[in-house]
Amino acid sequence: MTRTYDVSSTFVHTIEADHGTAQEVLATIDPMRSLADRLSALGLDDRAIWSADGELGYTLIWRFGDDQGHARLDWKLALQPTGAGRTALTVKLGACGSDPAARIRVLRSWLLFEELAKGHAAGLARMVGEYAEDALQPVAARQLVAVGLGF
């Protein structure tokens, strides 16, 4: 099903890691947790529902108040190999309002959500790259050391 949005943006960041390693890293972290925590800090908890929407898809439904409609914001994350051992992280953000008044509110607040999403995408790319770099570091073999106990 293709969803229609009132507004959308796409952010692409290159990660210095091969596609397989980047996928492994992304599978082991909760990529949207820090963004959800920041939105909660704004006090959205009593007006918002946050959910996973399939693999690497996330949705936020934000109620504006009694009979004032709601906004739906969808984040879709994807990794694509770019060659030379690098990977592109793509974050797509789309939003729509439930009725004409809600659409106006979505459009008026779009720059805020776009800036949050842009910053989150950059931080997520950095995090995946750093985790991937750490995963590729060779682990030094531990050596057993004989110790005389003097019995």
Image (cartoon, rainbow, N blue to C red):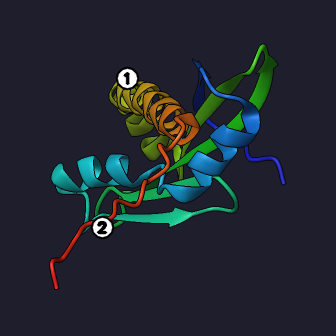
| Residue with the most extreme top position | 84
Horizontal relation, residue 141 to residue 38: left or right? right
Give the numbered dot on residue 66: 2
Q: CA distance from mark 1 to mark 2?
A: 25 Å
Question: Which residue is at 64% across, 27% downward?
Answer: 17
Q: Nearer the viewer, mark 1 or mark 2?
A: 1
- Residue bearing mark 1: 111
Q: Is residue 22 above or below residue 121?
A: below
Please tell me which residue lies in front, 118 or 24: 24
First along the sequence among labels 1 and 2: 2
Q: Position of residue 23 (x, y in %)?
A: 68, 45
Please tell me which residue lies in front, 140 or 78: 140
Question: Which residue is at 51% across, 65% downward?
Answer: 51
| Camera sees residue 69 | no
Quadrant of residue 77 in the image?
Answer: top right
Q: Position of residue 147 (x, y in %)?
A: 25, 66
Residue type pointed to by label 2: Asp
Classify mark 1: residues with Cα within 10 Å, few (<14), some (14-19) or many (20+).
few
Classify mark 2: residues with Cα within 10 Å, few (<14), some (14-19) or many (20+).
few
| Camera sees residue 82 | yes
Residue type pointed to by label 1: Leu
* Labels 1 & 2 near each other (Cβ < 8 A): no
Q: Position of residue 112 (x, y in %)?
A: 32, 28
Question: Which residue is at 53% across, 50% downward?
Answer: 99
Give the numbered dot on residue 92: none
* Element on which disc 1 rests: helix
Q: Is residue 64 above or below residue 86?
A: below
